[in-house]
Image (cartoon, helix red, strand yellow):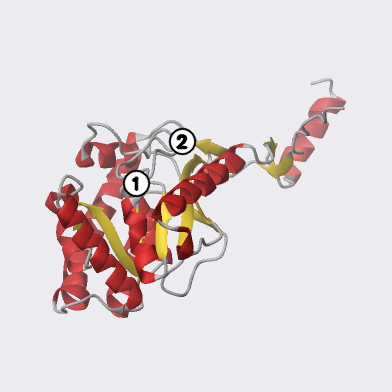
Amino acid sequence: MRRRKQTPAPVLIHYPGRRLRRMRPNALRRFWRIPMLLLYLLLAYPLALWTCARKAQPDASSYRAFAWWSRRALRVLGIRLRVDGKIPVQPVMIAANHVSYLDILALATLIPGRFVAKKEMRDWPFFGIMGVWLGTLFIDRSDARASQRIMRQASDIIMAGTSVVLFPEGTTSDGKSVGEFYAAPFETAAAAKAETVPVALRYEDVLQPGQPDGLCPFVGDDSLFGHLWRLAAAAPLTLRVEFLPALPSELGRRQLAQQTRMAISDALQRMEQGASVTYLQPRRGRHPLRDAWAAWRRSHGG
């Protein structure tokens, strides 16, 4: 006899207050978000010069400074992190699905490590120079020899005691599905004999848990300034970050790529198929004057 699939029981929670309600994009938010972002950008340069640019290699203070700045930037944009799973403390290779450049800020707040990014990011305003100061490894996927050299350098970084964060898709996606993973980046973990930790990322509407948000993905021909302009008017969002069980390096790069992609895809599917949320009406406090007025109207047939 075939077993029927059980529907998860709904979770009853009180409707969020006005500050967390999902509303249409409001252009008025730009009046305070954009000036605050500019303020933090102005603070970022002297902070990076003091903690990163003067050093041959980034150290713990460099990562702490960037984590502090990233947390403030995400807060200004109204993005709240929800972290699940165990954050690794030993040097590992972090492999995550890629939705937006905001992924880098989110992971930087949680993991002190070096990122691997496409070479085009080096020419971006602000992000390019900050990436250079933070020791980002810029990779040219059209040059196989240069890519192999970067992967060997990433292995050396892990063996020296620092985690490496990369996005094996090689590009961004809409957040609804996971693209194919390149196997070559996983040679980093195999060569360093380090574990690979898959990380699932999903941007969600506050009032629609599990459903991917359509505003945060940075895909196609979208420009950096155009995306930030729209994001500055958006309502608050939740970024779910789930650290999945680590995979051993003995699997080899192809098996690591397949199992990492499968683990992240399953995690995103679980987010969508989780318990549904039913919002209760907001609770109202007792107001003697309002209650007295309502009682008088009832007694007089109002």
Element on which disc 2 rests: loop
Q: Badge 2, how many Cα within 10 Å: few under 14, some, many 20+? A: some
Dot placed on the residue nearer the N-terminal end, 2 or 1: 2
Residue 202 versus residue 293 in the image, above or below: below
Q: Quadrant of the C terminus?
A: top right
Residue 174 in which image quadrant:
top left
Q: Which residue in the rendered view is the most extreme toward the top?
A: 301
Q: Amino acid at mark 1?
A: Tyr
Comparing 295 with 120, the one in front is 120
Comparing 140 with 76, the one in front is 140
Q: Quadrant of the N terminus?
A: top right
Q: Amino acid at mark 2?
A: Ser
Q: Which mark is residue 182?
A: 1
Residue holding disc 2: 177
Comparing 42 with 9, the one in front is 9
Left or right of 292 on screen, residue 139: left
